[in-house]
Amino acid sequence: MDFVLGGVAACGACFFTNPLEVVKTRMQLQGELKSRGTYQVYYRNVFHAFYTIGKVDGLAGLQKGLVAGLVYQFSMNGVRLGSYAIIESLGYIHTDGRVSASKSTVSGAVAGVVGAVMGSPIYLVKTHLQSQSTSTIAVGHQYKHRGMMHALLAIHKQHGITGLWRGSSAAIPRVSVGSAAQLSTFSASKELVSDLQVFPDGSWLVALSAGMISSVVVVMAMTPFDVVSTRLYNQPVDNLGKVRNCLGASYFRIGPHTIISLLFWNELRNLYQSYR
């Protein structure tokens, strides 16, 4: 049940944050393998990217890759959050009744590795679909996938079964580092906020506050890996140039997704426990 609760929480967050993921992907691919000043800048900042995509690709363009995104969130975060919940329920992340920074970090990293391996093929497809755009504002390599299943079959036909895990060498450290930072910070922050007694015991505001703290830490930890991962997944061959700093675009997506998914996850677990 822990895996289902984690997957449902992540899917709930995905509905709200998928447009932010589309914007982040486009901005990370802009200027790929080119020096500053040698390429056309279609997206000047996050808000301009929203406007440009909505204007040229239509409002539906902001939800590109939604189905793949939902499947990815359920498979990757279902396994990741579910694994961490099981480890937590066994008492491993605690020492003398308090959250251990080292144990929660290791647990989060291990859960992240497992989730990344499981979700890698869908993340590959999601990146392809979200990068696809009208030629006038296209960035990165452009694929012609008609949907998630068509993309999976096309990749398998061209590259074989191993081709579905291309780019996972970047995704595994990305999710592992992000998961370690996110879950350890969330657990420790929940404990800290509860100790301060700012909110009533069991209040959803405790999880919200902890999620906001966690969102800052996870973006700082994940952004370099995220840029590398996005480019490796989207390139037709494994080739990588200069990595750009995309902290703004990364937080605009990863930040809200972290806050919403952790809040949903915490409340769903509490709800489930109350009805057991």
Image (tube, rainbow, N blue to C red):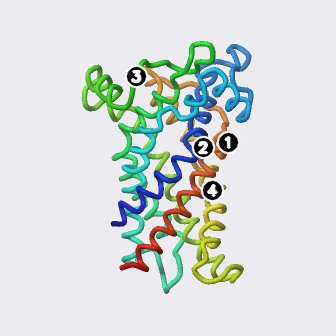
| Closer to the eye: label 3 or 1 | 3
Question: What residue is at 39 percent from the left and 23 percent from the top?
Answer: 146
Q: Mark 1 points at which residue?
A: 247
Left or right of 29 in this view: 11: left
C-alpha distance separating marks 3 and 1: 29 Å
Q: Which callout, 2 or 4, points at the residue further toward the start of the chain?
A: 4
- Element under disc 4: helix
Q: Do the residues labelled 4 and 1 touch (CB within 8 Å)?
A: no
The amino acid marked with disc number 2 is: Thr
Q: Which callout, 1 or 2, points at the residue further toward the start of the chain?
A: 2
Indicate the position of residue 178 as horizontal and vertical percent values.
53, 52
| Closer to the eye: label 3 or 4 | 3
Q: Name the residue under label 4.
A: 215
The amino acid marked with disc number 3 is: His
User: In the current view of this chain or complex, which residue is farthest to the bottom?
Assistant: 96
Foreground residue, 267 or 105?
267
Left or right of 24 in this view: 47: right
Please, is residue 219 above or below residue 187 in the view?
A: above
Q: Mark 2 points at which residue?
A: 223
Q: Mark 3 points at which residue?
A: 145
Indicate the position of residue 26 as horizontal and vertical percent values.
59, 29
Foreground residue, 54 or 18?
54
The amino acid marked with disc number 1 is: Leu
The amino acid marked with disc number 4 is: Ser
Q: Which callout, 3 or 4, points at the residue further toward the start of the chain?
A: 3
| Closer to the eye: label 2 or 3 | 3
